[in-house]
Image (cartoon, helix red, strand yellow):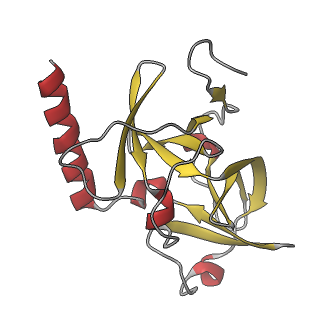
Amino acid sequence: DRRPGDGGRLLPDAGPGQAPQPGGLMKLIEFECGGHRFAVPLACTRRAVMAAQPAPLPGASSIVLGVLNVAGETVTVLDFARRAGLGATVITPSQQVLIIDLGGLPAGLVVDRILGAAERARPGAEETQGQPGAAAFVDAIVRLDDGLCLVLDPEKFLSEAEYGQLAEALDAADHEHA
């Protein structure tokens, strides 16, 4: 489905729900970045749009690439590759921005390719804890036939300091344009 005027693609509605329990099924949107597979919960996913160069956001942390206007809403674009340890993002026309709800804030992750919706079994805590490379924002590590998929916890993607710095930068930008 496309919305007129913004080139965006709506993603399936996850509907209300609670966090999945260990051993239960996780409803996810899977994507690739830097040759690796990642996923976010479907419930926090808003839409995907083609990548575009964001406008700078002075005062934001280095993880923030800037902001985009998507269907009249200001979306903060984050450097997912950098946060995942894959190096800084250089935005190309072939990439997409996966827009998620990041603690009430619309945020875009620049990704190489969106693979689509999937249901995956949630591994038990003992399978995820202590895994090499399991950063604080990784909620689960799912073993697939062709490799691993790191499932992100959007609430933990930014640190408290980064959230605060972003809020201040967005407020300053709003006052500047008011």
> Is residue 64 shown left or right of residue 93?
left
Q: Quadrant of the N terminus?
A: top right
Q: Closer to the camera, 73 or 58?
A: 58
Q: Is residue 63 above or below residue 98?
A: below
Q: Quadrant of the C terminus?
A: top left
Quadrant housing residue 88: bottom left
Is any part of residue 29 visible from this angle? Answer: no
Q: Closer to the camera, 26 or 95?
A: 95
Instruction: Say which residue appears at 63% left-offset and 61% top-offset.
Output: 21
> Is residue 104 shown left or right of residue 51?
left
Q: How many numbered marks appear?
A: 0
> Is residue 169 shown left or right of residue 74?
left
Quadrant housing residue 147: bottom right
Q: Where's residue 48, x and y in %?
A: 61, 36
Q: Is residue 158 above or below residue 117?
A: below
Instruction: Say which residue appears at 57% left-offset and 53% top-offset.
Output: 19
Instruction: Say which residue appears at 26% left-offset and 41% top-offset.
Output: 57
Instruction: Say which residue appears at 43% left-offset and 72% top-offset.
Output: 136
Q: Where's residue 167, x and y in %?
A: 22, 43
Q: Where's residue 69, x and y in %?
A: 41, 26
Q: Where's residue 162, x and y in %?
A: 26, 57
Q: Is residue 82 above or below residue 55?
A: below
Q: Closer to the camera, 15 or 148?
A: 148
